Image (cartoon, helix red, strand yellow):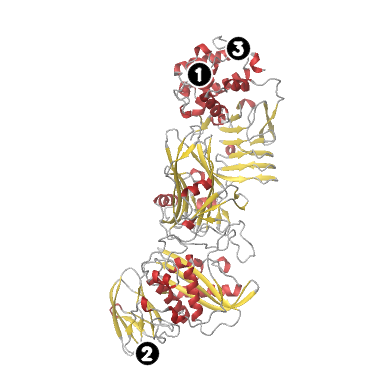
Amino acid sequence: MIQPTSYEQFMLELINRARENPLGEAQLHSIDLNQGLSPGQISSGAKQPLVMNPLLIEASRYHSDWMLQTNTFSHTGASGSSPGDRMAQFGYEFIPPWMWGENVAWQGTTGALPTDLTGYILDHHEGLFLSPGHRENILKEDFKEIGIGHSLGNFTQGASTYSASMVTQKYALSGPNVFLSGVVFQDLDSNQFYTPGEGLENVTISLPELGLETQTWASGGYQLVVPQGSHQVIVSGEKLPAAFTKTVTVEDSNVKLDFMADELFLPVDYSWDDFDWDDFDDWDDDDLGWNDPYLPQTSDHFTLYDSNAQTPKDLLDQISSNLNGIEIVAGSVNYIGADRAVSFFDNINFGPDVFMDKPGILLSSGIAAPPLTNTETGYSVNNNMPGDSDFDALATAAFPGAGKTYDAAILEFSFKVTNPGVQSISFDIIFGSDEYPEFMDSSFVDIAAVLVNGKNYALFDGDPTKPLSIIGANVEGGSFLNNDIQSGMGQKSPYSIEYDGISPRLSINIPLDDDQEVYDVRIGVADTGDNILDSGLFVSNFSTNLFRLDGLQVQRQAPPEGGFVGPAGPDTATQFYSGGGDTIFEGSTAPDIYDLQAGGSNTIQGTAKQLHADSIIGFDTNDTLKVFDSTFTKDDLTVILDVAILEFDSTGDNKKDTLIILQGDFQDATFHVEAFDQGTQLTFDVDQPPDTPEYAGAFMGALAGDDVVLNAVLTNVFSGILGRMLDVDANNEIQATPVFNTLVKVFTFIATPVDQRPANPFAYTDAEVNAIHEQLKASKAGGTDSINAAFLSSSANFMDALYDVLNLAADTDPDAMPSLFADGLDWMNLEDQAIDVAPLVFTESTLV
């Protein structure tokens, strides 16, 4: 059986000394117990002692040897293995509840190593204890077992080669076993503490009533698995003057029982105050090449949050881009988590589709300053912080086997809407995790979320079983990019960030409800099932929108030179961005958004199924819409100011089943619908502007007086809101929205003779509105004189648009025509406000 050396045993004794009295150990090294950590992160109470596990010793020695042989200093080992991989490789079985951790350290000299390496072990221990992350592993309460691998050899770093001492410590918890352990030694240097060379071998440790017995190793150490209860322990052997009996009580934690053999052979029960560190200062280590192992590596690209100098409001300000129309509720901004679990950044660019060009924050389940390269497959920092009940529920809903959450880092705040024209809010996010892909669909699927009033909007395809987490449906659907280290192949990870799996930039969109007064937002990330293997959520570009968006879209950016850009997955909603070049976009079967405002010559193509419910923003004369295997005509196109609505029958059953909305500058536009060999395409060009302005411009100019309410109408109705007139319900049926209702009432008011108008557009009864619409339809056909003749004679273009609106409403649901106008401008908060409008009589001179 593998046994620890005396130096490995000595290191265990130092670790268990620290676990017995964490505050005393910190004072010994002249630091605060939580220096570099959040206050209270490590408790001052005693921790259960660790016991040596032979399998973990073997795995630790293997990694120390490998680092020396390959001149590598990393938690990532041979063939890209993680610490957990190596533990399992050497036969260590992970039985729930389980967890693991690893510390590594080295030091060396350009000369020869001394014969006595006790000083090196002391320096290793001191360096690791001074490092916040390593101190957490040393003092983690849940760990029960350890393996220590101490190896010697040449180690080259940079241009220098050292005679080196390399140490790997593997910490573990696996299953419910409880251990009795300790060391039997002669205190040859009278310092009341074990020193290498003092251990007594082949001393028998027995518990007769349980039939348990073991012998001490050459190092003097021993360990036994024992049941709970009160047990008699007998220590005997040829090297002892007599046998000794001691009664111990075992509960649910390990018990350490040491024996120091002197003339009386008494069990060790030393006081901490008796220990004198100066007894170990006899070694001259001035020539030692100490490499302080502050692992894991971090990046100064991120600035860690400091609660002593900054506030949670600073975090919110960092992600805020455009908050016009909302107001943050005073005192509502709060941050939950360790200081080092959140950081600031100015921008990030990890590779294609994984970038943010605006400032933001990183929320992490570990340390929020990951290196800008993948340094290891098991990047991990334990913040020893609690999880969150909301995140527990989200993880369980996504994967029933998910465990409890830990190390949550959450930014929360509340806001009110001050401009009812604001229809949605949005965030840009990127999610990365070192759980990818090994722990997919396990109880360790770390979770990230964007919650608004308790609902999570960070869902792929709007599916509650597909949140931001390493679950099979997300990985297989292409929602995560593989950033794993290609160990042994001489290749770097493809993206410039630590996380093994990383999402593209995502857009999270949250629609707002007219009846909601306050919105409570929680954005965060948490470990699941344990405190190890970090995940991170990058957040930026918190904005308000004057149009309604809902759900998550994966963002795809076209390169400047153009090319082909497809969706994240065949059924994954995607938000595309043009790059100024000649680009072909092909979307998913989910609702996609194409933002072509960066210019270029763009082709949006796909089947009717792929393009249904898609929106195209910034559609220009250089752009083309191609629908494969479908036929449509200009009669299927409705153009209202800056919005073109294409609705057609793709299956030949005389039922319109495909809806595509295009937004652009369509004034003076002539659309062209043409067949091509695979389907039908749509383009447009612009007619030469007439000598006199269009009626719409004159009409808007006439309305744009000093009246505040009228200006609100203009701003909210005519400036880009027409694109939100229609929506698609769960049955893919076109439905009128409040904006649509608003437009019809305003149009009706304007088109009504002055002497027949109510006090404002929102005072119409259903019957009055219906009657007016009948008059409008009749006037369109050349009938009644009941509408202002001057208005009609000079406003053909406007009346065409008005008639199209009414006709579209009638086609949508003829029986519901009266109800389309019932709600009016409630959403604009203009109900009951009088509009003082001078008589609108338009003549030819108005258009000059």
What percent of the width, then of the height, locates residue 783? 57, 10
| 10 Å crowding of disc 3: few (<14), some (14-19), many (20+) | few
Q: Nearer the viewer, residue 20 or 778?
A: 20
At label 3, the amino acid type is: Ala
Q: Is mark 2 on a helix, strand or loop?
A: loop
Residue 754 seen in the current view: yes
Quadrant placement of the N terminus: bottom left
At label 1, the amino acid type is: Asp
What percent of the width, then of the height, locates residue 388? 41, 52
Does 467 appear above or below 669? below
Q: Is residue 256 left or right of residue 636?
A: left
Marks 2 and 1, Cα distance to the nearest angstrom?
108 Å
Numbered tag placed on residue 790 in the rendering: 3
| 10 Å crowding of disc 2: few (<14), some (14-19), many (20+) | few
Give the residue number, with chain letter if any, for mark 2. Answer: 239
Q: In this view, does 46 lie to the left or right of 588?
A: left
Question: Mark 3 or mark 2: which is in front?
Answer: 3
The mark tally for this picture is 3
Quadrant in the picture for residue 636 = top right
Work out whether mark 2 precedes mark 1 in sequence or the reverse, and give the earlier one: 2
Residue at 63% across / 61% down in the picture?
Answer: 492
| 10 Å crowding of disc 1: few (<14), some (14-19), many (20+) | few
Give the residue number, with chain letter if any, for mark 1. Answer: 836
Residue 88 seen in the current view: no
At label 2, the amino acid type is: Lys
